[in-house]
Structure formats: structure tokens, C-alpha cells
Image (spheres, grey):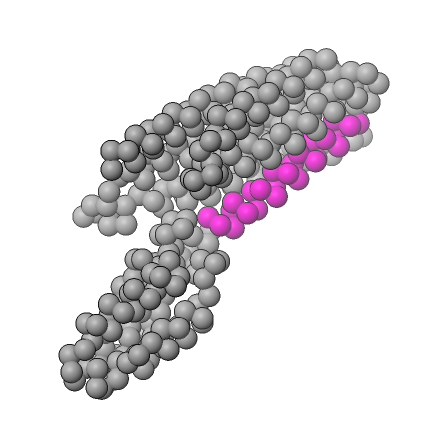
Amino acid sequence: MHDHMQGATTIRKHLWWAFWINFIFFIIELFGGIYSNSLALLSDAGHMFTDVMALGLAIFASKIGEKIANAKWTYGFMRAEVIGAFINGATLVFICGFILIEAFERIGSPQNILGGPMLIIAVSGLFANGISAWILSKDHQDNMNIKGAYLHLLADTLGSVGAIISGLAIWLWNFTVIDIIASIFIVILILIGTKSLLEQSVKLLMDTVPEHLDYNTIKESILSLEHIEQVHDLHIWSISQNKPSLSAHLKLCPECTETHHWSKCLKNTQTFLAKEYGIEHCTLQIEPMDFVEEDHCG
């Protein structure tokens, strides 16, 4: 336990280093984009903002995950990570909309862009992403929370490369149209990542069946177990990412109920679900065949 806590502290320290590096360069790119009048640089600043948010969420999830459930928060605080991810994604969609509107307005009215400062700042942004990814490179293999932030940083390097190419073209040939092209390219990158983030967070908040599990397959698997005759009120959801849960009502055959064998059936079902599907948190209600419920939905 002590080693686990010490490891979590070390990982969180690495996350904080990456967070502050990206936050500082986000501010530099934001004001640099305003100063140089580069939409591509502002777009990359928006993408770097997603890195800052992703790292912040990883830090928050790492810290909040250490809190235990209590009488009020019976599931603990794992859903806070999901809520933060949804807010993060919704904010990014708004930022992308603003950038696209500005890009289309600039098509008919060329802007004067300072290619030199833009290029310097874009290279600095690429450097920040590289350093941050290197800091997390040793942690992302064994920690999915860190892996999400790590992949976020790697993806952002493409945005920085786009801004660098744009800065070079403007500085060398005064080809300002490429700034619009680069900004749209970066927005597309952001929206691709945001789509996945929003879909995943909404599914978790709506308690849908996790993507790696199949409702009908699990139901048939339970019915194939010895002594189980019927399954109803079956619900499968996820408390947070990679924390699947299940609840169900099981009707046992008369022989099992009459011989008080139901406790063994309960244990066998729980063990089966944990081993075959990784569902370790399950609530099962055992019922005799003659038990009648007025309302059920499964």
C-alpha cells in the first residue's frame, strides 16, 4: 500500500511538471498569436489548452481516486473525472467554432501576419509538447489515466508542426493564405479528439453498457450457468472508465431453492462475471421461481 501511494505521488509530480510547461507555453502561444495576428498560432494555442485540460484532469483523477466512498458519496468520486471531461470537450467545441468563423471571415480579407515571431513561438510550442511527452513517457505504459494525457500531447505535436510550416511559408514567401489552411487543419484535429471525448463521457454519464461488453451475450452467459432459469432487471453500466458494474434479478430452479443451494449459485455467478467479463462490482438478487414482481424492466 505504501509503495502504491508513493508511486501515485511520483506520477502526480510528473503530471504537474508537464502541466506547468504546457500552461506557460499556452499563454505564450495565445498572446503570440494575438501579437503576430496568426490564426494558426491561436488554433495551436487552443489545442495546447486541451493538453493543459487533459493534464489537469489526469492530476485531478489521480488525486480524487485516492478518496474512499462514504455514507453520502457511496460510489466515491470517480464520476468527477467524467464530468470534467465532458466540460472540457464542450468548451473545445465552442473554441473551434470561434476559430472557424474567424477563418472564413479572413478568406475574403487577407491579414498582415508576422511570420518571424509566429515561427519562433510555434517551435517553442513543439518543444514544450516534446518535453512534456518525455516526462510522461515512463508512466504511460502502466497507467491508462496517464496514457490519455500522453497521447493528447503526441497528437498536439501535429498542430505545432502545422503552425511551424505556416510560419515558414509566411516568413519566406509571405504566403498568408496558409495560415487559414493550417488553422482549419488544427481545428479538425481538435474536433476528432473531442468527438471521442464527448461520446465517451456522455455514455458514462448516461450509464450505457460499456463498449467492450455485450448485453445479450452476458445475459445468455448467465442463463447458461447451472440452476439459473431466468434473468431480468439486468443492468450493465460503468461507474467510471474501466469500472464496469452489473445488477440483476436471478430466478433459480425449484431444486436449488428448496435445498438452500442459492448462496452457492450467487457466489458462482459473481465469480463467473469477474473472471469472464471483468465485472467485479455486481449486485444480484436471488428469487425462487414462484416469486412474482409487479414491475421490472429487463
Counting from the top left corner in percent of width and height, residue 6 is at 30, 30
Q: Nearer the viewer, residue 16 or 121?
A: 16
Residue 57 appears in the rendering? no
Residue 25 appears in the rendering? yes
Figure quadrant of the C terminus: bottom left
Answer with left or right where residue 164 lies relative to residue 205.
Answer: right
Q: Is residue 237 above or below residue 79?
A: below
User: Does residue 44 belong to the magenta stretch?
Assistant: no
Q: Nearer the viewer, residue 221 or 79?
A: 221
- Which of the 4 image quarters holds residue 252? bottom left
Answer with left or right where residue 234 lies relative to residue 70.
Answer: right
Q: Nearer the viewer, residue 275 or 49?
A: 275
Q: Residue at x 65, y 26 (%)?
A: 160
Counting from the top left corner in percent of width and height, residue 185 is at 70, 35
- Which of the 4 image quarters holds residue 12? top left
Q: Residue at x 67, y 14 (%)?
A: 120
What secondary structure prevails in the magenta region?
helix
Residue stretch rendered in magenta on the structure: 177-201
Counting from the top left corner in percent of width and height, residue 62 is at 36, 35
Q: Residue at x 22, y 86 (%)?
A: 254
Q: Nearer the viewer, residue 290 or 295?
A: 290
